[in-house]
Amino acid sequence: MNNKIPSKSLGIFPRSWSEEQAGRIPGNIPIWVGILSELTEFAIFFVAYFIAKYNYPEVFATGPQGLSTSLGVANTIILLSSSYFMAKAMMNIRLDNRIKCERYLWLAVSCGAFYLIIKTWEFYWNNLQGLSTSTNEFYTVYYYMTFNHFLHVGWASCAILWVIFRLRAGEYSAAEYSGLEALAVYWHMIDLMWILIFPLLYVLR
Amino acid sequence: MKKFKKLEWFWAVLIFITLFNTFLGEQFESTALVSIIVALTVMYKGITVIDHFMELKHANRNLRWLMRMYLILFPSLIIATVFF
């Protein structure tokens, strides 16, 4: 019979990766497994983008001109702001200020909702211009990347609502906030992906 | 209190870089210089989010390294496209 005390670590990483040796893991290990999986998924999209751009330079030079740059810029500012609000929420939970923490989480989820509305409007506007996944290689990559990102913002926004519910239930405090922190790092990862997507699809010709 | 001000500063810088990059993309032909500036500023934006918003600067060094490499590798490919 195994009477070992369960370790906090999953025991699947090298010892040098342990929190004792490499430093604290923000959130928890499962969320980082998720984040690294998501990063791999987006990496495949980015590699596909560069391969397609190499093979169809003309299509990728003219493609961004058909998109609404102002909607792309608006969404970038909204996501950067959401990341800022999330960081402020984290600061306030560490100070045990749950009221302010909740306020910043509502601001972050509002940003998520604004992003989704603007992105939906952008897809509708593209449709009115006659753009679709089959227009050319640029738009195929554009729709794959942005719709995938759209889904991530959608479910992460729902996760913020869940975290607000748990915060109101008194589950988080200055002493215990790992669940909230796990969501925060996931949300920042989504922002990071948009930081990469925006110049590739809207800025560079 | 000092750290609160620091966050606001990074937020403002990130928004400024976004607007600056958009201006470059809209006003100038996509030259090698524009691509390189955009790539370098994207790296800076990514590393700023990783270090100060994600708070990995003083956290697990392996996770920080992985995240940083990701945000250096893909913008570097933008620079590589200059030579296509």
Image (tube, rainbow, N blue to C red):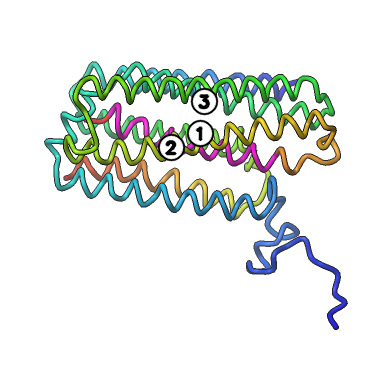
Q: Amino acid at mark 2?
A: His
Report the Cα–Cα distance between label 2 and label 1: 6 Å
Crowd around label 2: few <14 · some 14–19 · many ≥20 (10 Å): some
Q: Quadrant of residue B40?
A: top left
Report the side of B26 relative to A73 (left or right). Answer: left
Disc 2 to disc 3, C-alpha distance: 15 Å
Name the residue nearer the viewer: B77 or A36.
A36
Label 1's element?
helix
Tell me if label 2 and label 1 are in contact, CB under 8 Å.
Answer: yes
Chain designation of label 2: A
Q: Kindly identify which chain the residue marked by label 1 belongs to.
A: A
Q: For the residue marked with disc 1, what is the amino acid?
A: Val
| Label disc, if present, on residue B69 of the rendered structure | none
Residue at x-position 55% and y-position 34%? B49
Which quadrant of the view contains residue B35? top left
Residue B3 picture location, percent across and down: 70, 25
Outermost residue to the left = A58
> Which of marks 1 and 3 precedes in the sequence?
3
Earlier-in-chain disc, 2 versus 3 = 3
In this picture, which residue range is highlighted in magenta? A181-203
- Per the rendering, the mark at residue A153 is 1
Q: What residue is rendered at 25% in x and 24% in y?
A: A127
Instruction: Give the residue type that dot 3 points to.
Output: Leu
Q: Which residue is mark 2?
A: A149
Instruction: Please state the horizontal and vertical placement of residue A25, each as a whole percent of the image.
Output: 69, 50
Q: Quadrant of the N terminus of chain A?
A: bottom right
**Depth order, front residue of A111/A125:** A125
* Image x and y of residue A109, in percent: 60, 25
| Chain holding disc 3 | A
Q: Which residue is mark 3?
A: A80
> Any magenta on residue A183?
yes
Residue B46 lies, with reference to residue A168, above or below; the image says below
